Amino acid sequence: QVRVEESGGGLVQAGGSLRLSCAASGRTFSGRGGMAWFRQVPGKAREFVATIRPIGTSIYSDSVKGRFAISRDSAKNMLFLQMNTLKSEDTAVYYCASSSRVWGSRKESDYDSWGQGTQVTVSS
């Protein structure tokens, strides 16, 4: 059974930075399926943020491109999201997700294991 757990959220001022971490168990990064970050604001649908392919290339949503960077430590089964130049609209609960069957997907339905989420609050 795959489990993922996020950490690193918190309160930061606009323009600041945070780094989120995701610890994965029950899978490796060389296995089938990718990992990604999503976020959700109360009352809105969960939104794709970023995912990383096996060869290391990354896909980002337009709203975070150029400010966020996704990375991984395959040896430790860890996924990261470095968030720079944060804006108030980045305030959300951030989720780490694992897929058992696809790589590089932006679709929530392609991911079958989710963490509990970590709150990121950006004050203006």
Image (cartoon, rainbow, N blue to C red):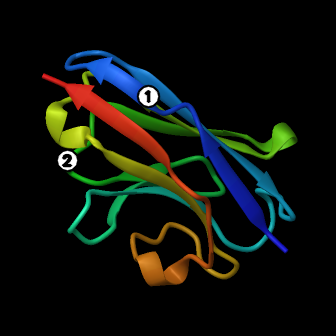
Front-most of residues 123 and 55: 123
Q: Nearer the viewer, residue 34 or 3?
A: 3
Please tell me how crowded label 1 is: few (under 14), some (14-19), or many (20+) other residues with Cα within 10 Å.
some
Please indicate, yes or no, whether residue 83 appears anywhere in the rendered image.
no
In this view, the mark in front (2 or 1) = 1
Earlier sequence position, callout 2 versus callout 1: 1
Q: Is 76 located above or below residue 59 in the figure?
A: above
- Residue 79 located left or right of residue 18: right
Q: Nearer the viewer, residue 113 or 123?
A: 123
Please tell me which residue is depicted at 48% across the width and 33% down the height of the picture. 9
Expressed as whole percent of the image width and height from the top left, the position of residue 37 reads: 48, 54
Mark 2, Cα crowd under 10 Å, few <14 / some 14-19 / many 20+, is few
Q: Is residue 78 visible?
A: yes
- The label shown at residue 23 is none
**Helix, strand or loop for disc 1:** strand
Q: Residue at x 79, y 43 (%)?
A: 74
- Residue 57 in picture, x, y percent from top left: 51, 49
Cα–Cα gap, marks 2 and 1: 20 Å
Task: Give left or right: position of 74 versus 60.
Answer: right
Q: Read off the residue under disc 1.
A: 10
Residue matched to label 2: 63
Name the amino acid, label 1: Gly
Residue drawn at (63%, 52%) of the image:
55
Quadrant of the frame with the N terminus: bottom right
Task: Report the residue that reaches farthest toward the left.
Answer: 124
> Identity of the amino acid at label 2?
Ser
Residue at horizontal 22%, vertical 16%?
A: 15
On the image, the x and y values in percent for residue 92 come to 31, 47
